């Protein structure tokens, strides 16, 4: 029996390796695989970060959002590892400006270029909105408390703020191709100075929602212009970002957590503060330094195959990961209050239990991916440039988004 299991396991592994080699062979030779690896890393960071620091606590018949970072602030370094949005904006700025250059060279107008990019960005959104509109209505009609429904819908749709900001920056790409990152960084600095130092209105901080993410986006444009080649630029950004962030946290009183904490007076992320932006600059520096090792690592067919498939469904994964966590939580309530799923996140026992739930969240997310990936991969009717379809190539969906353009 053991030998039979080993034989089937070995056969399956050999099949996966063959498929990975086909994907490797189907990838255009000139493609910068490090870009796709950084995008996949950024998406993975956001997903794991939300799964680790977002809790739904069962309080009688009500579900309330909570975070382990509130009772255990010494866990703030977790947010440093998994708050990776700056890397996504860095890659997004690089890809968009490079794509715009290519479109102009082919004689494609701005309207057609923007329409193609935004349709790929928003194609998977409709399914999320429809499902949660139906779910929210059904919960309210069956007597669920409004607080519970509001919490669930807010968490499920929270990724949409990112799409709105990203879409706005994408639309402004022709104006941003030559903008230095120092300009939006200066805007963030003066907004925070007026807001925190001079007692200005909190609403002013929302200016940073555009200016803050414009910093890594314009760094991506500088990458396209060839201004960030070589390790020196990466080291300057990493060292400068780390030093500035440490100084702001230690001496200026900014929160150590790089994500929002329920009940906290100030959130570094909502809207972005100067500390969040300088932290993002450090992340961008680290990402630039990783380009060489990632390019070498992506030569391995198995590693590249995983990154390529993740990129083909990046938006689906991003949009549905919160739903996967909440579906697991709601289903678990049928059994009772389960540790790490419905209990208060106030000790290390909860952390250990939550880590054990991560594979379950991943399985449910995979089910969501299987159900809704066609919305993303069929959104434009154009072939993906991550993997080129040809005779003998991997049998992957080819109607999906060109994630590099």
Image (tube, rainbow, N blue to C red):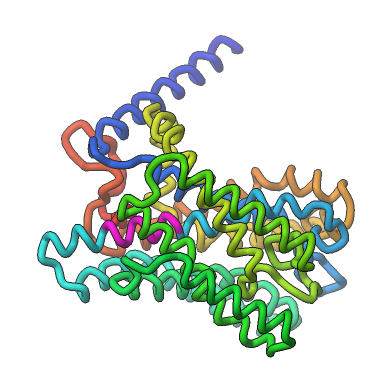
Q: Quadrant of residue 2?
A: top right
Nearer to me, 357 or 234: 234
Does 147 sit above or below residue 275? below
Q: Residue furthest left?
A: 107
Q: Quadrant of the C terminus?
A: bottom left
Residue at x-position 11% and y-position 60%: 106
Magenta segment includes 95: yes
Residue at x-position 65% and y-position 48%: 81
Query: Is 319 left or right of 249, judged from the image as shown?
Result: left
Q: How many marks?
A: 0
Q: Quadrant of residue 178?
A: bottom left
Q: Position of residue 235 (x, y in %)?
A: 53, 44
Does 57 sit above or below residue 10? below
Residue 401 visible (yes or no)? yes
Q: Residue furthest top?
A: 3
Nearer to me, 359 or 198: 198
Q: Which residues are magenta?
A: 90-98
Residue at x-position 45% and y-position 50%: 39
Magenta segment includes 400: no
Q: Position of residue 76 (x, y in %)?
A: 76, 55
Q: Quadrant of the N terminus?
A: top right
Q: Position of residue 102 (x, y in %)?
A: 19, 58
Q: Position of residue 312 (x, y in %)?
A: 37, 50
Q: Quadrant of residue 60?
A: bottom right
């Amino acid at each position: 029996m053991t030998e039979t299991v080993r034989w089937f396991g070995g056969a399956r592994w050999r099949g996966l390796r063959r498929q990975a080699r086909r994907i490797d062979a189907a990838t255009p030779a000139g493609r910068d695989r490090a870009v796709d690896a950084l995008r996949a890393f950024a998406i993975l960071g956001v997903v794991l970060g939300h799964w680790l620091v977002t809790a739904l606590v069962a309080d009688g018949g009500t579900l309330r959002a909570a975070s382990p970072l509130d009772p255990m602030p010494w866990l703030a370094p977790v947010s440093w590892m998994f708050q990776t949005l700056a890397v996504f904006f860095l890659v997004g700025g690089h890809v968009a400006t490079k794509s715009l250059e290519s479109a102009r060279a082919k004689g494609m107008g701005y309207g057609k270029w923007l329409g193609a990019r935004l349709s790929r960005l928003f194609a998977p959104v409709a399914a999320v909105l429809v499902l949660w509109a139906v779910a929210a209505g059904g919960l309210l009609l069956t007597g669920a408390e409004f607080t519970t429904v509001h919490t669930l819908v807010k968490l499920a749709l929270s990724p949409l703020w990112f799409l709105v900001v990203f879409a706005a920056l994408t639309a402004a790409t022709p104006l941003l191709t030559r903008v230095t990152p120092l300009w939006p960084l200066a805007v963030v600095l003066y907004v925070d100075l007026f807001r925190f130092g001079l007692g200005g209105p909190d609403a002013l901080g929302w200016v940073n929602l555009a200016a803050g993410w414009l910093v890594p986006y314009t760094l991506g444009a500088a990458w396209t212009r060839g201004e960030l080649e070589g390790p020196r630029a990466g080291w300057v950004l990493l060292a400068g970002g780390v030093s500035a962030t440490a100084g702001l946290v230690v001496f200026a009183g900014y929160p150590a957590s790089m994500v929002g904490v329920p009940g906290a007076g100030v959130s570094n992320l909502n809207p972005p503060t100067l500390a969040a932006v300088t932290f993002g600059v450090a992340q961008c520096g680290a990402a630039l330094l990783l380009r060489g090792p990632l390019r070498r690592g992506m030569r391995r067919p198995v590693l590249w195959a995983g990154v390529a498939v993740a990129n083909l469904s990046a938006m689906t994964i991003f949009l549905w990961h919160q739903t996967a966590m909440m579906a697991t939580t709601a289903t678990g309530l049928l059994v009772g209050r389960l540790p790490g799923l419905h209990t208060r996140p106030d000790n290390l026992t909860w952390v250990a239990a939550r880590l054990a739930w991560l594979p379950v969240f991943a399985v449910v997310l995979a089910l969501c991916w299987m159900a809704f990936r066609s919305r993303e991969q069929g959104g434009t009717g154009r072939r993906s440039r991550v993997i080129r379809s040809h005779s003998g190539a991997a049998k992957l969906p080819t109607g999906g988004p060109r994630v590099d353009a």
